[in-house]
Amino acid sequence: MKNSQLFIAKSEDHGTASPCPASHVLFSLFSETAKPSQYTEMDIDKDSYTKLIILILQFLDEENYKESLHLLEQESKIFFNVNYFRETIVNGEWEKAEEYLSSFTKLNDNRYSMKLFFEIRKQKYYEALVRNDQAEGVNVLWPDLKVFLDLQDENYEEIFDLIDLKNFRDNEHLSRIVNKESARAISWGDLKSLVEQNPTLQDKLIFPRLNQSGLLSIITLICPNPGKKTSIKEELIYLILQFLDEEKLKGTCHKLEQESKIFFNMNYFGEFVISGEWDKAVMYLSAFTMPDDNQHSAKIFFTLEKQKYLANLGRNDQVQAIKILPNDLQDNFLYKCMDAASLRANLCDVLKESVKSNPILQDKLKFPAMDKSRLLTILKKIMDWWIPHCANSTTGLYKSNISLVNIPKVPYLCREPMIVVNSHCQEASALPVPNGLVFHDSSCCNDVSLQAGMKSSEKCGSRDNTYLADANSGVYGKSTEKLTEINDPSECQALVLPDTSLTGGVTRLMYSCSGDFILALTQNATHKLWRWYCDDQHSSIKASANVEPQLYQPSSRLIMTNEIGTQPENALSCFSLNDPYLFSSSGGKISIFNLETFERLSTFGSPPPSTTYFTFLMQNIFAIGLDDSILIRCFDSKKTIAHLKGHQKRITCLAFSKNLNVLVSSGADAQLCVWSTNGWEKLASKFLLSKGEMLECPVVNHIEFHQDQIHLLAVHERNIHIYEAPTLNHSMQWVPQESDLPITYATYSCDGQSIFVSFKNGCIKVLVAKTLYLRCRINVTAYIPPGLSSSEVYPIVIAAHPFQPNHIALGLTDGRVHVLEPLESEGEWGISPQPKDGEGLSTASCSAVLE
């Protein structure tokens, strides 16, 4: 954008700019040379500016605006996202990796930077050689690597070796490469070390630990009730767009317009038309509408594609091309083609009218009129107000001691009235908010007076107990949504899987990857397998509560039974599928079974120590949890690759992230550990400490990665936690009501949108994974017939179907397996409620945190 007026709706373009209904306060533009330190007029310093950038980065990440996120990282240069940089390397996106790195450091900044660029270009060259693409290799070598020859740095000799290389297998580095994945993993190990040691990057590698939705909470505090046509989140996006425009962060600004879809920037779109950049114009337009949406969209796309076609032709070809167009499309384009500049100017006016008449775009064309420097001012005022009133402050506390970590979720904020006045807004009116919080319609606006009018005893430092982890919702503050409860079999689809004998409680349960069978392991070391078949063709179908499966028995009549260890009462059962084989243990040796014949093919690993858990990391590499350590073994060679020590008690669970290439282990010592597959070093280790449980360490019973391969679910008998790998930053926790405890198990749905939690009282609770908000409670009476129900019968384990996000199976203490689905008319479990204004998640500052 050339100036701030690209955001201001002129009367001839979009009509008169409307008064701000809520947070609409447009930043005026600083001069081209303005820096954050020049905010003297507003008394906003560089620290406030940096805090705001960090909060915006958090918001973009939480809303999954990934392209905007990484562009802002590059344009602001405040945070170097190591995980994103790693993704570009692992995916072989060398240009993208170098572009990202170049935003933070230049090749000749220091020897670490020089080495970083060299390693990226060298790996790119290696892969060209491995593909036997000598031509591409030469293109990469010159000029990408030639610059290092000119500099005659420490890489000088290595470059000459590359030039003289005739056979890539003659090179020591290349000879060890099995495939490009392993090569990139090795390369990333070197690059990661260089990034961490680089003095230019060192202060940009750690992102502050924040309460969730920090910036959104601030805006919610100021504007608890936006205009009818916009939500708080949309209001915030407008403010962010203003800030980005003012700060000349153009790439992020326009990418966020596209990802958020709330504002179609006509002037930005027009720039592409005037300059004849038709592909960019189409790409921008495509973020908001597609050709088949309506006739208006179809016409705009057709016009752009036609101009692109004509632009690609020579002058004579243009004349001929226009002649063969239908008469109603020829118009006077032949004349206009003689003057490209005039054509584009006229075309811009035509497209503007088409955009204005398009119902899909009409409500996205006006950008609200707003006061100067709004978002920075809001943050500054909030921080100034927060320090003396809401930070449990002591005498002599200065604002330099307050970081973003101290900014709370909305429910933590003081029960103090505040009035915020916006010069662009209508007369403010009082708005009701939860628990006596008195706000006025601030509209997130102008110079503010954040007034404290409550007794000191009511300050935020002394929280009301009713706002500590609400028993039902897992959020702060009482929910007014009516909870969906399922009490009767008629309110859901429930099926008890057929069984010929009950042989102890079900300790492990899983679906096949294809979803056509379910496998259970019982306490007496016996396996059971149920398959779903079509009645007519006897072929497999997906598991369903509407169709009863068959308890599978092969013609051999064999039963898959594990060896039982010398102390069966202390043994942990575990198994893992590596199709078509089952690896399983019940305290004794690990058995390998053929799932078609039930034949035991082999056993290995004589205890002690006994196996407590294991999982496959790759096709032939698996991790084995023991009483106090972890073995990494190669199945093909039967060799131990690594022996990981760090836990003081038995391993309870293992979880592997393919995207991060890390293994996470949980133990009976209440510890979580993160191990890198590159050298098997320990990356992070934290202990779970809970209030009232300091003397007896809580056991983390189960851990599981979300489908994003970053967020980690950890299950304890009194609460569940969400962490972020590989740092193990604590994201949020959920605490159920006391009468339901203890928790027996919890697992993500296949789409990662829900978390199913089982309890010893037999009930199942369904949570919204992103917010940990309770959406449904399935009571035991809904799936266990009265004749089978007792206080001793409850779920031990839950298995989520691999394709159907609302389909689960429960393994019970009596050995039965039950399958549950919502009614077909419902489609999903309960409602998907959103937290009310004034409510927030339980975060790392509440009753259970990792230290």
Image (cartoon, rainbow, N blue to C red):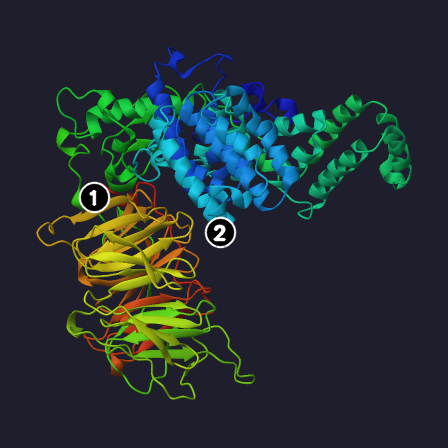
**Side (left or right) of 806 relative to 312:** left
| Cα–Cα span, label 1 and label 2 | 48 Å
Would you place residue 320 above or below residue 45 in this image?
below
Task: Residue 202: name its quadrant.
Answer: top left
- Other residues around mark 2 within 10 Å, as few (<14) / some (14–19) / many (≥20): few
The extreme left residue here reads 695
Question: Which quadrant is home to the C terminus?
Answer: top left
Question: Which quadrant is home to the N terminus?
Answer: top right
Q: Which structural element holds mark 1?
A: loop
Would you place residue 633 above or below residue 311 in this image?
below
Give residue 167's position: percent from left, percent from top. Answer: 58, 43
Question: Could one spot residue 24 in this view of the protein?
Answer: no
Question: Where is mark 2, residue-wise?
Answer: 178
Q: What's the residue type where badge 1 is placed?
A: Cys
Q: What's the residue type where badge 2 is placed?
A: Val
Give residue 730's position: percent from left, percent from top. Answer: 28, 44
Choose between 816 and 670: the one closer to the eye.
670
Would you place residue 501 above or below residue 437 in this image?
below
Residue at the (60%, 33%) spot, across then down: 140
Question: Could one spot residue 249 in this view of the protein?
Answer: yes
Give residue 454's position: percent from left, percent from top. Answer: 18, 29
Foreground mark, 1 or 2, reads: 2
Question: Where is mark 1, residue-wise?
Answer: 846
Task: Residue 590: name its quadrant.
Answer: bottom left
Give residue 409's position: percent from left, percent from top. Answer: 29, 38
**Side (left or right) of 328 relative to 378:** right
- Other residues around mark 1 within 10 Å, as few (<14) / some (14–19) / many (≥20): some
Q: Which structural element holds mark 2?
A: loop
Choose between 341 and 711: the one closer to the eye.
711
Q: How many marks?
A: 2
Of mark 1 and mark 2, the one earlier in the sequence is: 2
Choose between 130 and 543: the one closer to the eye.
130
